Image: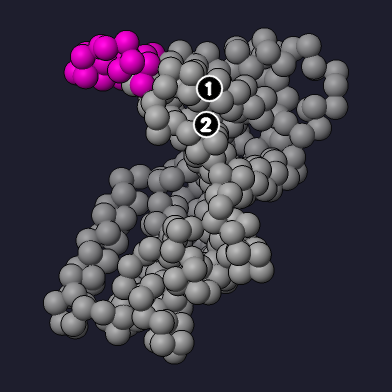
Amino acid sequence: MLERDELDGPVRAGILTSAQADRLISYYEREGDPLADREEVRFARSFHDVFITIGIVILFTGLFVAFGTLMPEGSRQNLPTFATAAVVAWGLAEWLARRRKLALPAIVLSILFTVFAALGVMALYGVLAGVPGFTNRLDFLFFGSWEAQQSGPLVFGLAAFGAGALYYWRFQVPIALSGLVAGGLAAAGAALEIASPGLVSEHPAAFMLLAGVVSFALAMRFDAHDLDRTTLNTDKAFWLHLLAAPLIMHSAMMMVGSDTGSTGEAFVIIGVVLALGVVALVVDRRALLVSGLVYLGIALAQLFGNANVQADSGLAVVLLILGLFVLTLGSGWTSVRRTMLAPFVDSGLFDFVPPIRTLEK
């Protein structure tokens, strides 16, 4: 079996990039083990990546503390703060993402650059347009304040789309594609609201569900082009699935009106989570279930609360159920998927989803 340290020489010599070396190792691991995980996403090669990421978090925390201390509060503080943060994030990405090929720092810097670049453009727009209100708070992210904030959400969405596209073009970091898509969806929602006031703000759940379906469809497009999951397409799909799942789940929660905490609504939520779990098994993407676990916990807590179970006891039982659910499904994922999809083995389904893994080579 090929080991990672055997490829350090070619990486240092510039023959292979670090990402290519990681992919090569993944390929040989899958060839040697037909049951190897196909949803492998590399966040870090070693603790060095984690250590560098901790440094990034500390640096940006210090940056905001410094600006908060040196400048008076208000929109004129936000503009240089956000702009400086975006520039620093880009500069660090040139070093850590482009030159050093560090995965986890590149992911964190992608998020930081996209968010701060969009906020910086928002702050600049607020100053130039004389509408500083939305540069002081993040209220513009909520549909209820769109009318007061005028075209702020549209500016934010377009800026996030542009920042994500720029970062993806320069550094080829898969998560930047999700930032691009999220910004585009936000801009589309803002544009619809401006064109037809109330269309989105009065139906946020429907728009959120549509946005989740669009993200899922884009993820499946990348998955369909890499059924063996050996290229960067699988990482792009992973982050898009991670974006789609909470949008779909939260829209479902809004539609059933879960804030009342009724038993019927709790069962509806559990049904939605189970349906999402079936989809996750079909497309072989555990990422789809991540956000579902949160809502499953909320639904279970509602059920125990309605049954007059003490809060501490109910919390313990919910955590135990969730833990057992994750461990059972996680350890038996391949077997469950094989059993569920066996009747469709000769269908066209497998033109779009990974094949069933068996013990046969």
**Disc 2 marks which residue?**
256
The residue depicted at 72 percent of the width and 16 percent of the height is: 341
User: Is residue 284 shown to the viewer in this render?
Assistant: yes
**Magenta stretch holds residue 309:** yes
**Disc 1 marks which residue?**
268
- The segment highlighted magenta reads 302-324
- Name the one closer to the observer, 102 or 172: 172
Q: Is residue 221 above or below residue 163?
A: above
Given contact means CB atoms under 8 Å apart, are the residues at marks 2 and 1 in contact? yes
- x and y, in percent, of residue 281 in the image: 62, 23
Q: In this view, does 179 lie above or below 303?
A: below
The residue depicted at 46 percent of the width and 82 percent of the height is: 125
- x and y, in percent, of residue 59 in the image: 24, 66
**Magenta stretch holds residue 42:** no
Report crowding for label 2: few under 14, some 14 to 19, many 20 or more residues within 10 A (C-alpha).
some
Residue 142, image quadrant: bottom left
The residue depicted at 70 percent of the width and 20 percent of the height is: 356
For the C terminus, which image quadrant?
Answer: top right
User: Is residue 101 shown to the viewer in this render?
Assistant: no
Instruction: Tell me if 200 is positioned left or right of 130 in this view.
Output: right
Instruction: Tell me if 233 is positioned left or right of 249 in this view.
Output: right
What is the basis of the colouring in this image?
A: one colour
